[in-house]
Image (cartoon, rainbow, N blue to C red):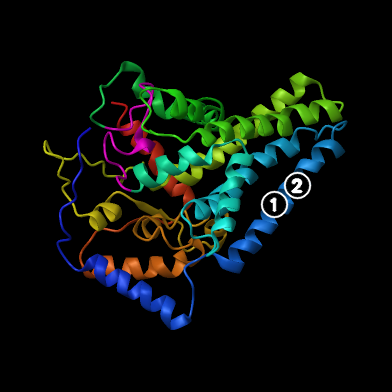
């Protein structure tokens, strides 16, 4: 596989930005971890998850029996992108075991944290929007996101049928993609420790027991009703997840990078992170809280070793410094505009 090389930084943009960020933490005597703020967020979300799960048994004989499953979908995603994401980057806490515990929350909702960490840290973060290097750009022939992909007749309808495909995102992730990453010879994940194979099957089994077999054994719902409820849970989770993640890298403003024939990138590492990443709704405290700072995505790519609880201030520093160095900073004012921009890209690339 071709080795990718970033050229040297052409200016002092990243050095100055990092210096300002370091000063912010020093002057305020802050640590870069999530600390109490993240711990409090974890307790709020975990208690909410337990209560909503309990509601499955309380509402089993009512017209609202499907409602807890529908709420559990996005609530699980909110927990993962807030707590597990910081844990995977080692910034949820200064304590290693607590980072590992937060990371484990991803496994408990059915998604394997080991391969996601590999894909996320060593693929997406190193080479965002880079063809053949960013695993998040892997796509089916049904969808034409990248302009260089061969155009098919049905692509002109993709902005219509892609929302249907998105409904099954977490089903594919939990029941298919994780196993492909573990067992496919084409997988980018290599040298997987044996213990991770054990954890894969243990946590997948725990997930199936919690959301399928326990409701079947201890409620009056039929197995078909429980399967249907799980489908609704995945649909609500999938839409929330795609709404949260897709606009940051795949929209009208997105830039997709191709290294030259010898593997050299056109931009330095820091410039690449800014150019290929899009922020949205950064002024919204509600969006920032719910999305775990994913809307402050430029800051996350430049400073992934800082917890998302600090991103609002870091983003203001990044915006200020990009302006000084005439480096384009892409931003959508609202989540709705960001998501519409994504579908505009699909329509434009559909031919």
Asked if the residue under mark 1 is in contact with the one under mark 2, i.e. CB atoms within 8 Å, the reply is yes
Q: Which mark is residue 46?
A: 1
On-image quarter of the N terminus: top left
80 versus 351 height, above or below: below
Task: Please state the horizontal and vertical placement of residue 13, each as a whole percent of the image.
Answer: 23, 67
Magenta stretch, residue numbers: 126-146
Task: Please state the horizontal and vertical placement of residue 281, each as a whole percent of the image.
Answer: 46, 57
Q: Nearer the viewer, residue 154 or 138?
A: 138
Q: Main secondary structure of the magenta part?
A: loop
Task: Please state the horizontal and vertical placement of residue 337, each as a whole percent of the image.
Answer: 43, 48
Q: Secondary structure at mark 2?
A: helix
Q: Secondary structure at mark 1?
A: helix
Q: Nearer the viewer, residue 94 or 166?
A: 94
Q: Nearer the viewer, residue 347 or 281?
A: 281
Q: Is residue 293 magenta?
A: no
Q: Which mark is residue 50?
A: 2
Would residue 102 appear left or right of 177 to someone viewing this image? right
Q: Nearer the viewer, residue 285 or 160?
A: 285
């Amino acid at each position: 596989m071709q080795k990718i090389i970033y050229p040297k930084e052409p200016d002092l943009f990243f050095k100055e930005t990092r210096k300002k960020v370091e000063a912010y933490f020093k002057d305020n005597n802050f640590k870069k971890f999530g600390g109490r703020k993240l711990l409090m967020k974890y307790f709020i979300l975990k208690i909410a998850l337990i209560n909503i799960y309990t509601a499955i048994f309380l509402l089993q004989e009512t017209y609202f029996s499907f409602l807890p499953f529908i709420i559990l979908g996005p609530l699980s995603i909110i927990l993962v992108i807030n707590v597990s994401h910081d844990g995977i980057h080692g910034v949820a806490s200064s304590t290693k075991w607590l980072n590992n515990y937060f990371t484990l929350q991803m496994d408990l909702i059915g998604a394997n944290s080991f391969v996601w960490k590999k894909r996320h840290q060593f693929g997406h973060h190193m080479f965002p929007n880079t063809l053949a290097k960013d695993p998040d750009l892997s796509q089916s022939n049904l969808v034409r996101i990248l302009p260089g992909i061969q155009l098919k007749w049905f692509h002109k309808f993709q902005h219509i049928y892609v929302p249907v495909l998105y409904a099954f995102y977490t089903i594919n992730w939990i029941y298919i993609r994780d196993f492909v990453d573990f067992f496919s010879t084409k997988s980018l994940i290599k040298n997987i420790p044996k213990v991770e194979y054990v954890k894969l099957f243990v946590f997948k089994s725990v997930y199936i027991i919690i959301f399928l077999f326990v409701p079947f054994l201890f409620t009056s719902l039929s197995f078909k009703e429980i399967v249907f409820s799980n489908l609704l849970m995945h649909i609500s989770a999938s839409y929330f997840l795609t709404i949260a993640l897709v606009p940051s890298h795949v929209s009208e403003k997105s830039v997709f990078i191709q290294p030259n024939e010898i593997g050299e990138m056109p931009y330095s590492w820091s410039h690449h992170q800014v150019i290929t990443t899009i922020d949205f709704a950064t002024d919204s405290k509600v969006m920032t809280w719910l999305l775990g700072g994913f809307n402050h995505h430029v800051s996350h790519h430049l400073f992934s070793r800082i917890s998302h609880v600090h991103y609002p201030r870091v983003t203001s520093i990044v915006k200020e410094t990009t302006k000084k160095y005439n480096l384009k900073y892409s931003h959508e004012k609202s989540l709705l505009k960001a998501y519409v921009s994504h579908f505009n890209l699909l329509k434009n690339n559909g031919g």
